[in-house]
Image: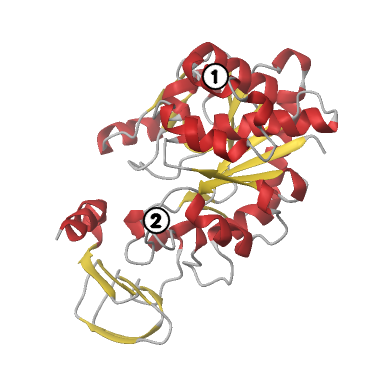
Amino acid sequence: MSNYCIIMAGGIGSRFWPLSKNNYPKQFLDIFGTGKSFIRSTFERFLPVVPAENFLVVTNAAYKELVLEHIPEMTPNQVLCEPMRRNTAPCIAYASYRIQAMAKAKGETNPNIVVTPADHLVTNEREFQRIISMGFDFVSQPNHKESLLTIGITPSRPETGYGYIEVAPEERGGESRVIEVRNFKEKPDLDHAKQFLAAGNYFWNSGIFIWSLDGIMTAFRSFLPDMVSLFDSGAELFNTDAEQQFINEKFAQCQNISIDFGVMEHATQRFTIPANFGWSDIGTWGSFYTHAQHDADGNALLGNIVVRESKNTVINIEPGTEAIVQGLDHCLVAYRDNSLLVCRLDDEQRIKEWVEDLSKQ
């Protein structure tokens, strides 16, 4: 009962345009046609190890009703509304102060916290839950109450779209056990990604973190003292009716910084559990293509589509529309809400830039 889950759900997912837009971002989409949105799947994935009342979703105020629509088990008080995007460190700090107030009211001492993005794919949920439980057990130990744990993923390819976690060479190939982290590496170029894969002591950084409340609060005080001072000025207001007004007034003063740059790169007690539970950060159309079902010609299709003489292509159109596609190879066609995208799949990293150009036009 002392396990908490913070779901970060404030992003737009602009690389999934035109499906993902400001008014209905990626975390609320059912991109694979499974009948469940990303955020719904995330909630259900953690529910066996975290009670429903201990979930918090941090999001934009504009998405609060969408969160409650997709997760009706949650109360409005469990949806924390950021007045603006300030990256992951302020998001996690805000939720941690709320958990601190909730735990105090319930008489809990030093609860466990798992932090997760809202839009990941996991295919082996039983193994995922086993790994998360292992992480909770680790940070619950008295000698690890200030340890910060991240879930690593055993890489299957030289991926340039993920950050990497480096462990000692003698830990090469380790899985399903806690290992000390040597370094965090930013998204590499292809040559470095190949080197990481060959070395065997590098893992993808999933962006899923586990720590105790005392552990993360100690880290914030050590590495982001200005942010702590800001939240401390209204600590007694968290989990009260005055919380939102305080956040609306103070949140913009938080440094715009990620938890990786703000905390993890400076911490000394950093650990990882390398795992393999069918994980993917579905952040791009390319990652969607990797995990989608393909026809005999390697096409990933969703919608009422007739395809001729095309291969290795993603075609995703909204229900109620029809499409005939001929003569494409390794391309992307996506249509939603009167918006159409046609491009080379290899150029998908430029979609965000193109969307910005479109908004200026």
Please say if the residues under marks 2 and 1 sit with CB atoms less than 8 Å apart. no
Residue at x 69% of width, y 45% of height: 55
Residue at x 50% of width, y 14% of height: 225
Along the viewing direction, whichever of 215 and 101 lies nearer the viewer: 101
- Quarter holding residue 2: top right
- Quarter holding residue 345: bottom left
Name the spot of residue 150 as percent of width and height, x first: 57, 30
- Quarter holding residue 81: top right
Q: Is residue 125 visible?
A: yes
Name the spot of residue 52 as percent of width and height, x first: 75, 50
Q: Amino acid at mark 2?
A: Ser
176 shown above or below 293: above
Q: Amino acid at mark 1?
A: Val
183 shown above or below 320: above
Task: Name the side, left or right, on which 176 lies relative to 329.
Answer: right
Residue at x 32% of width, y 66% of height: 18
Residue indicated by mark 1 = 228
Name the spot of residue 301 as percent of width and height, x first: 39, 76
The mark that comes first in sequence, 2 or 1, is 1
Q: Is residue 152 visible?
A: no
Name the spot of residue 15 as percent of width and height, x first: 32, 55
Name the quadrant of the N terminus.
top right
Task: Name the side, left or right, on which 231 lies relative to 98.
Answer: left
User: Which residue is outermost to the right?
Assistant: 107
Disc nearest the viewer among 2 and 1: 1
Name the quadrant of the C terminus.
bottom left
Residue indicated by mark 2 = 287
Along the viewing direction, whichever of 286 and 223 lies nearer the viewer: 223
